[in-house]
Structure formats: structure tokens, C-alpha cells
Amino acid sequence: TSGTEKTTLEKKGIDYQQVYNTIADMLEENEDYDDGSYGPVLVRLAWHSSGTYSAADGTGGSCGATMRFEPEATHGANNGLAVARDFLEKVKAKYPEISYGDLWTLAGICAIQEMGGPIIPWRPGRFDKTQEHVTPDGRLPDAAKDQRHVREIFYRMGFNDQEIVALLGAHAVGRCHTDRSGYEGPWTFAPTSFTNEYYKLLLDEKWVEKKWKGPKQYEDKKTHSLMMLPAEMTLAWDKEFKKWAQIYAKDQDKWFEDFSAAFSKLMELGVPYAADTKVYKFKPTTA
Ligand code: CCH
């Protein structure tokens, strides 16, 4: 194709790196929000919009962005995610051609990369679906439960034990909010930095039940300022889970590699791609 033709083609399409840069520039626009970044809540939106997938019947997943609708928007697990959806409306207004599913997943990847995480390959192609495609409540993990439940939920999506442990390391960033999940506090001392600190703290600190009126959660005995959910304490208690947690605590490069692959897979569950769909690897604005 000639230079002019190519420019016309590119004009019709969406410049996804530009969308990425726009989101990246907005992440820290409000220093009063949480720890100063919308990154963590955007990661949670990307995950909850994808984690409804069921491999058995192909329902759910990020294609469709059905969390825009009731009752999915108000499923208990999604409390607080309106913050992330509203944040991204500003980006949607600038790039109206992008589907919500592509926007939410791209934003999650942008947030991880901008917080210092690995490069995560991403492909466009999700399209908006209607309210009839909302999945039933109960497809996302319940933090109060044990490893049987965690396995049941993630096996349903098609993940194995190694991928489960790799994905949970995303709790390196962000925090629990009493007015969203009922739980309270961050998992690490640097909740806007994407590192393998989560595994180190989980395995090295002594975790005790927090004494409070809220739901059962654990706190580190030393500082009482960090938290772990009952469901994720199983990463230290279950033999097979612990094996991977130890590997990731020792080797951040290995974790980055495995996390990138697992998160990319999560974002793509149930998305009907054409074989020649272009793979994007976005350039961090911080590099
Ligand atoms: Fe998570 N997560 N998550 N999580 N999550 C919460 C917050 C975040 C569970 C429970 C909770 C993943 C898996 C699990 C993030 C990413 C991931 C909260 C607090 C609970 C509860 C919500 C609140 O109060 O705001 C459980 C249980 C599981 C699995 O068993 C996976 C997988 C990912 C991504 C790969 C991120 C990020 C947050 C922080 C959100 C924020 O607003 O700071």
C-alpha cells in the first residue's frame, strides 16, 4: 500500500497506544483518591469483567462488558467498581469507537504496566453485548472461603494451580475498603507498585486474625497494618499453592513472566478472535 492509503486506513482504526497513553496520564490525576492512583481499581475492573467466564458453556468473560447493566453492576463482588467504570467514561468520550470490553481490559493492562508490572500482550476485538448476556451472581471468588472454593472458581475459567497463584499476586497493589467489600487495608507497604512483595509478605510475616467487628481477616503481627483474606491465606497453607508462592517470592522475573501470560489469558477468555488479530504490546509511558 502507498503511504497515503496507509494513513487513511490508520485513521479509520483506533490508535490503541494513544488510548493507553491517555489512561496512563489520568491514573494519578486525583492525589486524594486512595493511595494516589486509580491503577488498582482499574485492575480489579478488568479482572471482574473477565472472571465471570465459564469454560463449560462459553458464557461470561470480558467480551460484552455486561457489568454496565443490572444486576451485574450491583452484584456484591462488584461493589465499588462504579468508580473505575465512571473514570473510564472520560476515555470512552474521547475514543467513542472503542468497545467497553476492549477499553476495560486495555485499562487494566495499562494500570499494571504503569505501576511497574510486566508488559502484557493485548488484542482488540471485544464487542458490546446487551443486558441478556449478564451472568448469574456467584461466579467471582468469595474471600471468606477456602482453597476448595478458590480452585472451583478458577478451574471453571480454565486455570490451573500455578496460574491461580500467579494471578493472586496482583494483590501487591490496591486495598480493601470497608464500604465496598467489608474488608479493610492493603496487602503491601507500597500499594501502587507492582512487585512480588505480596508473596514475600505472605510467606515471611506472621499472620494473625484481626480483632475487630468486621468480617474475618488476617493482619501481620508486627505492624497490624497489612491484611490477608481467608481465601488467600490458602496460598501459604495449601501444599501445591505454597510451592508456587515460594517460587514467585524468590524470583520476580519468573512471576512477571507467568503473571503476564495468565493475565493475558484471563483478559481473552471467551473472546472470539480472528486468527490474524494483531497483538499489541504497549510501551509504558514511564520507560
Ligand atoms: Fe482481588 N480483591 N481477589 N484479585 N483485587 C480485592 C481487591 C483487589 C479477591 C478478593 C478481593 C484477584 C483475586 C481475588 C485485585 C485484583 C485481583 C478485594 C477488596 C477483595 C475482597 C475490594 C474492596 O474492598 O475494594 C479474592 C477472594 C480473589 C481470589 O480468590 C485477582 C485474580 C486479581 C487480578 C489479577 C485488585 C487490584 C484489588 C484492589 C482494588 C482497589 O480498589 O484497590
Image: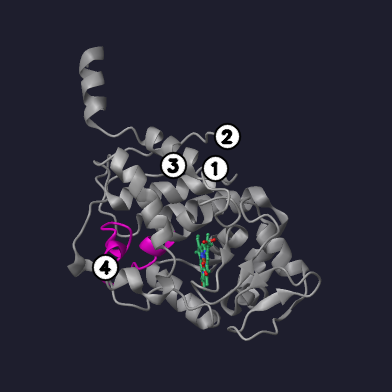
Query: Which circle's residue, 3 or 4, is located before the other in the chain?
Result: 3
Instruction: Assess whether mark 1 and mark 3 are in contact (beta carbons under 8 angstroms).
Output: no
Q: Position of residue 268 (x, y in %)?
A: 36, 54
Marks 2,1: beta carbons within 8 A? yes
User: Within 10 angstroms of label 4, few (less than 14), some, or many (20 or more) residues?
Assistant: some
> Quadrant of residue 240 in the image?
bottom right
In three-dimensional space, the C-alpha distance between marks 2 and 1, rounded to whole angstroms, equals 7 Å
Cβ–Cβ below 8 Å for labels 3 and 4?
no
Q: With 1 as the anchor, is 217 left or right in this view?
A: right
For label 3, the residue is 23
Q: Secondary structure at mark 4?
A: loop
Estimate the x, y position of residue 28 in percent, counting from the top left.
54, 45
Whether pointer 4 and pointer 2 mark residues with C-beta atoms closer than 8 Å, the reply is no
State left or right for residue 208 relative to residue 164.
right
Q: Nearer the viewer, mark 3 or mark 2?
A: 3
Q: Which residues are magenta?
A: 47-69
Residue at the spot of label 2: 286
Say if 245 sits above or below 106 in the image.
Answer: below
Q: Which quadrant holds the N terminus?
A: top left
Which dot, 3 or 4, sits closer to the camera? 3
Residue for badge 4? 59
Is residue 126 positioned above or below 168 on the image?
A: above
In this view, the mark in front (4 or 2): 2
Q: Identity of the amino acid at label 1?
A: Glu
User: CA–CA distance between discs 4 and 1?
Assistant: 31 Å
Asked if one can make out residue 204 in the rendered structure from this viewpoint, the answer is yes
If you read the primary sequence from the N terminus, does the residue marked by circle 3 or circle 1 appear first? Answer: 3
Residue 52 falls inside the magenta stretch: yes
